[in-house]
Image: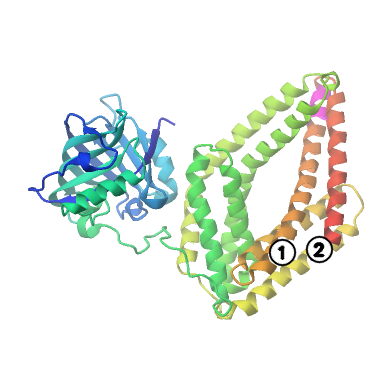
């Protein structure tokens, strides 16, 4: 990805044409002001026609002029900060000025989905830059005196003009902005009432606090024991949808841990819908659970290869060199890399399909306006414990079924089913935390412990299958030494037996 950037921290101030700058050296820590620099900037802002990015406080623009010409994407962070990401302008005359770089488009794909990005505003800015220098010669911040002319390109095009001051931190401390605000306030200059230049350019078309299609603006109301059971469900769905929103661009950039986090959110969504299915219209639940299974499977292909590769390579790293016979490390490593790359590419392809975008549409619509049944309107303290007890009973039945199986493939399958039931109990218990924190925490901790133990047992099953396939079949047919494959297979059998024993001990101590 051809992007770079950093964290943007700034304040804007509304000023009239006659306003005079105060003495900027009155700001604590500012020793002097560098020679003035002027720029003539032209920026084109991009969004969907219904301003989805703007509603999510995301800014995407193409700027020419100045020392930071290029594409700028600003993503909101906490405490008024924004993550600013840059991409260069096209280097060839045939590059289209209105073609947003794919590297940036992918970072906002969750929001825009398959909607086209179009120019929504154009700004011409004459900027005078005052650099605030500290005692050691470092640039603490810059104050930009901007004269702006704007043109709204969508929704009844219109023009506007204004002046504003903008102070942005460079190497200065965070409290420098507070000090600068105090100095300017003493001269009657107040922080701007406008969120941004784009907000001012869009005028009455600038999205307010109301949610736009596909956007979740604020968390649902906190569940109360005497409140609706549906509130518990909606809050849980909202939280996991927000995880998808945060992880989608990270997955596209191959950020470590992002696939796992997104997969867990998908599983939680599917599990909560299963537990709380009686609170919603049945057709909605069936459709969403089916689509979440699809997404989880795509995410799992990439994630499972990562986990399996780490597990097998870890075994090899711990083996004495004398027991590694044949090219086992090269075979396992190269094949795993190939499989991981193919799985990740399949995932990226899936995240750019209408099927994925419609799933996001359906999830955001569900959180915004859930099709509740009468059960959802009953008191949470009555409905939710019953639903969690049902998950307890399903886990007990799964464990009893496992006790009746013979060791081997049948037992492995039964324990895997118990693991899935433990996971669903864990997620269900976590939703009840606002109602009964201590009990919910106790149940979820126990279920998570079972899930972790049985997860290790299941990973061993998968690893043994891979070792048998590649050592017992592929390596043998190539005439290679298969001793080390068999040794790792035996180690995995031992790990699985140990995990199963740990599970039965943990189960005997259930709360």
For disc 1, the neighbor class at 10 Å (few under 14, some 14 to 19, many from 20) is some
Determine which residue is flagged by label 1: 442
Q: Nearer the viewer, residue 220 or 187?
A: 187
Give, as a single range, the part of the protein colored magenta.
Answer: 470-477
Is residue 198 visible from the viewing direction of this image? no
Marks 1 and 2 close (CB-CB < 8 Å): no
Indicate the quadrant containing the N terminus: top left, top right, bottom left or bottom right.
top left
Q: Which element carries disc 2, helix, strand or loop?
A: loop
Question: What is the secondary structure assignment of the residue under circle 1?
Answer: helix
Quadrant, the C terminus: bottom right
- Compared to residue 459, the image places residue 135 above or below, namely above
Residue at the image position 31 percent from the left and 55 percent from the top: 50
Q: Nearer the viewer, residue 117 or 463?
A: 463
Q: Where's residue 2, x and y in %?
A: 41, 30
Residue 156: x and y in percent read 18, 56
Q: How is the image coloured?
A: rainbow
Q: Give the CA distance from mark 1 to mark 2.
A: 10 Å
- Residue 474 forms part of the magenta stretch: yes
Residue 319 in the image, given as x and y percentages of width and height? 81, 26
- Above/below status of 316 relative to 157: above
Residue 291 location, quadrant: bottom right
Report the side of 456 relative to 116 (left or right).
Answer: right
Query: Mark 2 — residue?
Result: 510
Q: Which mark is residue 157?
A: none
């Amino acid at each position: 990805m051809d992007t770079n950037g950093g964290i943007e921290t700034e304040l804007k101030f509304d000023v009239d044409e006659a306003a005079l700058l105060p003495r900027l050296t009155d700001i604590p820590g500012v020793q002097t002001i560098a020679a003035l620099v002027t720029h003539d900037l032209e920026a084109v802002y991009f969004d969907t026609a219904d301003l989805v990015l703007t509603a999510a406080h995301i800014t995407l623009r193409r700027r020419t002029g100045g020392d930071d010409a290029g594409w700028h994407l600003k993503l909101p962070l906490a405490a008024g900060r924004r993550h600013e990401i840059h991409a260069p302008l096209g280097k060839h005359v045939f590059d289209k000025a209105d073609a947003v770089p794919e590297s940036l488009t992918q970072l906002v794909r969750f929001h825009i989905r398959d909607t086209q990005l179009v120019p929504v505003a154009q700004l011409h800015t004459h900027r005078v830059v005052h650099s605030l220098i500290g005692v050691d010669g470092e640039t603490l911040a810059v104050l930009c005196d901007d004269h702006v002319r704007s043109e709204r390109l969508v929704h009844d095009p219109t023009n506007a003009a204004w002046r504003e001051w903008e102070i942005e931190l460079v190497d200065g401390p965070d409290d420098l902005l507070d000090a600068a605000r105090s100095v300017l306030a003493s001269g009657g200059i107040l922080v701007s009432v406008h969120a941004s230049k784009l907000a001012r350019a869009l005028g009455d078309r600038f999205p307010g606090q109301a949610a736009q299609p596909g956007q979740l603006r604020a968390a649902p109301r906190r569940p109360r024991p005497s409140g609706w059971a549906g509130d518990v469900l909606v809050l849980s769905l909202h939280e996991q949808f927000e995880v998808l929103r945060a992880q989608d661009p990270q997955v596209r950039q191959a950020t470590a841990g992002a696939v796992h986090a997104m997969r867990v959110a998908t599983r939680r969504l599917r599990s909560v819908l299963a537990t709380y299915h009686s609170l919603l219209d049945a057709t909605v639940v069936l459709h969403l659970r089916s689509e979440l299974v699809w997404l989880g499977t795509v995410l799992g292909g990439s994630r499972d290869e990562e986990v399996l590769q780490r597990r097998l390579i870890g075994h090899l790293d711990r083996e004495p060199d004398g027991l590694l016979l044949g090219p086992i490390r090269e075979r396992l490593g190269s094949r795993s890399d190939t499989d991981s790359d193919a799985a990740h590419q399949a995932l990226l392809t899936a995240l750019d399909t209408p099927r994925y975008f419609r799933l996001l549409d359906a999830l955001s619509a569900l959180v915004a306006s859930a099709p509740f049944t009468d059960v959802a309107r009953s008191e949470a303290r009555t409905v939710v414990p019953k639903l969690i007890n049902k998950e307890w009973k399903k886990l007990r039945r799964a464990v009893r079924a496992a006790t009746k199986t013979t060791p081997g493939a049948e037992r492995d399958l039964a324990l895997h089913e118990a693991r899935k039931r433990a996971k669903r109990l864990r997620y269900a218990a976590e939703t009840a935390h606002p109602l009964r924190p201590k009990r919910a925490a106790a149940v979820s901790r126990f279920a998570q412990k079972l899930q972790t133990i049985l997860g290790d047992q299941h990973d061993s099953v998968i690893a043994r299958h891979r070792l048998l396939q590649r050592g017992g079949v592929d390596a043998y047919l190539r005439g290679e030494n298969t001793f080390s494959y068999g040794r790792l297979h035996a180690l995995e059998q031992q790990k699985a037996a140990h995990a199963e024993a740990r599970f039965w001990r943990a189960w005997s101590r259930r709360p």
